[in-house]
Amino acid sequence: MEHLTDCHTHTWYSGDGRCSVGELCATAHAKGLAVVAITDHFDYAADGGREADWDLRAEMRRRELEQARTSWADRLEVLRGIEIGQPHWNPQDSRKLANCGDFDLVIGSIHDLRPGKRIYHDYDFSTVEACDALYQQFFEEAREMLRTCDFDVFGHYDYPLRKMDTGVVPPNMERWKAHMLPFLKELAQSGVALELNTTGMRRWMGKPGGEAWILEAFRSFGGRRVTCGSDAHFPRHVGFGAREVCAILRENGFDNITVYRQRKPVELSI
């Protein structure tokens, strides 16, 4: 049985989300998903500061998630999640947040790089040199994150590539293989899951994450856990590319896809 999953989605409890929990779940069910995880943003600043208004909205979000889990219980599995940006900028606090008991899964992501520059807004990607320097730093910080933080899934390794649409680099990760392979080895050995993010299907790359050499390397290093995430911020993007991800995994020797319940990995057949 093929299980379609989406373990990376956002509601209006994320600053850039554009849907309610109910709207997201209704769309997930309509698209035939078996599992959806709602993983709203929580980002750390370069000085270790916490996202200011998280605590104000956390309780409301918690109640709405529990209502959705009850309402959809016999039709759709709704997982409670969070996407923590730059957890390595405050490892102690991020560990406390990850283990507060509110989440089924925790995504660790990098949206900004030291000294606090936003990948989406503060970089010029018009030269090969700039792209190379950014990805070198990205994987250095990713490895630091793996060594110092507690999370279940490494989110969107191709996040910077989304913005490199100036034509100076190809729409794949091959150029940064030397930086990515050591990261994949540490990721596999840590037991943290690799996320195949489907945003690239909606961007200039024209395909989801999950290049064959990346999956082959991850497996060769002992990695077995892979999740699918649409990174949806609008209802129409929920579940986007889930079936394609299953096909990519099967083509590359994987029989299962991973979800998390109470921060424990669960393998579902694909």
Image (spheres, rainbow, N blue to C red):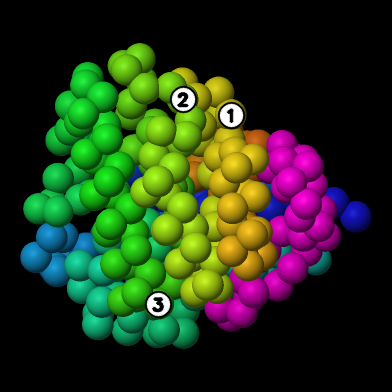
Which residue has dot 3 on it?
150
Residue located at (33% from left, 81% from top): 95
Which of the two labelled residues, at mark 3 and mark 1, occupies the earlier sequence position?
3
Q: How much space separates mark 3 and mark 1, taking CA atoms?
A: 29 Å
Q: Residues within 10 Å of mark 3 (few under 14, many from 20)?
A: many
- Quarter assignment of residue 220: bottom right
Residue 143 percent across, percent down from the top left = 34, 63
Residue located at (59% from left, 64% from top): 221
Residue type beneath disc 2? Pro
Residue type beneath disc 3? Asp
The answer to whether 11 appears left or right of 141 in the picture is right
Residue located at (66% from left, 65% from top): 224
Residue 127 percent across, percent down from the top left = 21, 21
Residue type beneath disc 1? Lys
The answer to whether 10 appears left or right of 256 in the picture is left
Q: Mark 2 touching mark 1, by CB under 8 A?
A: yes
Q: Quick check: 252 above or below 94?
A: above
Tag 2 secondary structure = loop
Residue located at (40% from left, 46% from top): 178
Q: Do we see residue 149 in this rendering? A: yes
Q: Does the magenta run of residues contain 243?
A: yes
Which of the two labelled residues, at mark 2 and mark 1, occupies the earlier sequence position?
2
Q: Quick check: 164 above or below 258?
A: above
Label number found at residue 207? 1
Who is closer to the viewer here, 12 or 210? 210
- What's drawn in magenta, residue-wise? 242-270
